[in-house]
Image (cartoon, rainbow, N blue to C red):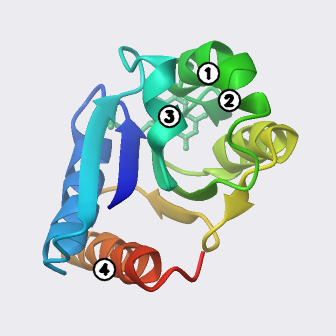
Amino acid sequence: MKTLIVVSHSQGGGTKKLITALIDGVSGQLFPELEIIIEDSVTIEPEKILKADAIVLGTTENFGYMSGALKHFFDRIYYPCLDAKRGLPYQLIVNADTDGFGAVNSVEKIVIGLGWKRIDKPLVFKGKITPKNLSDCKDMGGTIAAGLEMGIF
Ligand SMILES: Cc1cc2nc3c(=O)[nH]c(=O)nc-3n(C[C@H](O)[C@H](O)[C@H](O)COP(=O)(O)O)c2cc1C
């Protein structure tokens, strides 16, 4: 059994739409050996990350940085995961109004410290969420599910 953990937080609902589309893409693959755990970055227990084979991180860009919710997540999981989860494959999804660079940059500094391994380049969505954005997230979900199933990460 492989476990994918999806950790995000959405204040206005936009990030939630993107993450829901990604989860649809994972579920659509119908791999019985793949478990998906969906968590809010504010409330997730750090120990849950210990069982992850891959992680999706969803964040808004706030004040040129990742959301406070995702930073709170990193603050809590850093030491419990530092040695235990080196090499964890991760995919970052950013929802911003006009930029997104600060959110990507701030997350990447931390995941480099944690020794996590990028699955693919961050998906950054700006402005109003479009059907194409949702379809990109769904495709990414399918890619992650297939990669986990085939053991390529
Ligand atoms: C406090 C705050 C700060 C923000 N700062 C930025 C920013 O620096 N750059 C940007 O592109 N968008 C910024 N935004 C816009 C949000 O990233 C954007 O509206 C996002 O889609 C919200 O996602 P949500 O609907 O999941 O809450 C900010 C929003 C808030 C509430």
Dots 3 and 1: beta carbons under 8 Å? Answer: yes
For marks 4 and 3, the one nearer the N-term is: 3
Task: Decide if residue 59 is on the left or right side of residue 138.
Answer: right
- Which residue position is annotated with label 1? 77
Near-viewer residue (64 or 88): 88
For marks 3 and 2, the one nearer the N-term is: 3
Determine crowd level at label 4: few under 14, some 14-19, many 20+ residues with C-alpha closer than 10 A. many
- Which residue position is annotated with label 3? 49
Q: CA distance from mark 3 to mark 2?
A: 7 Å
Quadrant, the N terminus: bottom left
- Which residue position is annotated with label 2? 81
Dots 1 and 4: beta carbons under 8 Å? Answer: no
Dots 4 and 2: beta carbons under 8 Å? Answer: no
Residue 142: which numbered mark, if any? 4
Labels 4, 2: front one: 2
Can residue 130 be seen here? The reply is no
Residue occupying image coordinates x 68% and y 64%: 118
Q: CA distance from mark 2 to mark 1?
A: 6 Å
Mark 1: secondary structure: helix
Labels 4, 3: front one: 3
